[in-house]
Image (spheres, rainbow, N blue to C red):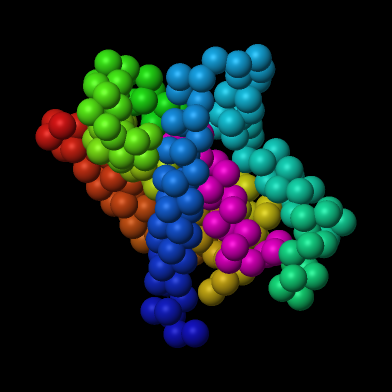
Amino acid sequence: MTDTELFWSPVKLSLEVAIFSLIIVLIVGVVTAKMMAHKKFKGKSVIDTFLLLPLVLPPSVVGFLLIVMFGNNSFIGELIEWAFNQSIIFTWWAAVIAATVVAFPLMYQSAKTGFETIDHDIEDASRVDGANELKVFLLVTLPLSSKSIISGAILSFARAIGEFGATLMFAGNIPGRTQTIPTAIYLAMESGNMKLAWLWVFIILLISFTMLISMNLLKKQY
């Protein structure tokens, strides 16, 4: 790799990981939030707490749990190794999983809040008019909660692109393969290359600032 390629590789990888994890948390987070928003059942608070747990756990704990779950000695790890003939640890997919796990609570909580604020009468009126549950969800529920979902998506993307601890433990810091901007900054500082570290810091600050500005602008439009 040339110096230019080495510099832009973590940026490209971070964006790829963040975008892919955003797609996952957007789908899974919205569906899960819809299921949990208005349901009342025994143990709901336990499940809700479990889904939000990655938000408050130290990144090292998240990384440790991911290694235990997907490691070579686990059932899931053995299944993946049998299916793909390689371990998932220290791969691009490991970085995606780590980013997805830490970003999911933000998407879930934001979407659930949006769903909980919707007036049930509006959804019921759509059902009376003949709309099935899928049409009610796509044409009524989602548009009414779009502000919360968009906010959650932006925050999830920003969280995913800034993930460090769990990624370092689970995916490693392999240049060109699993080295994201945060892990690249860490390595640059460790090696004393402060100029390179500052360049990456500037890029991630620019991305994060753009995400937050976009969220504020979108909130004003809705």
Q: Quadrant of residue 91?
A: bottom right
Image vertical order of residue 164 relative to residue 213, above or below: below
Residue 169 x, y percent position in the rendering: 68, 53
Please say whether residue 159 is visible from this viewpoint.
no
In the image, farthest residue toward the left: 221
Residue 50 x, y percent position in the rendering: 63, 28
Please say whether residue 114 is visible from this viewpoint.
yes
Compared across the picture, whether 76 is left or right of 30 comes to: right
Magenta stretch: includes residue 222: no
Range of magenta residues: 88-108
Residue located 51% across and 25% down the image: 36
In the image, farthest residue toward the bottom: 2
Residue 12 x, y percent position in the rendering: 41, 68
Image vertical order of residue 80 relative to residue 155, above or below: below
Identify which residue, 31 or 173, lies in the foreground. Answer: 31
Residue located 42% across and 45% down the image: 26
Residue located 31% across and 52% down the image: 207
Compared across the picture, whether 151 is left or right of 61 comes to: left
Residue located 44% across and 46% down the image: 27
Q: Quadrant of residue 124?
A: top left
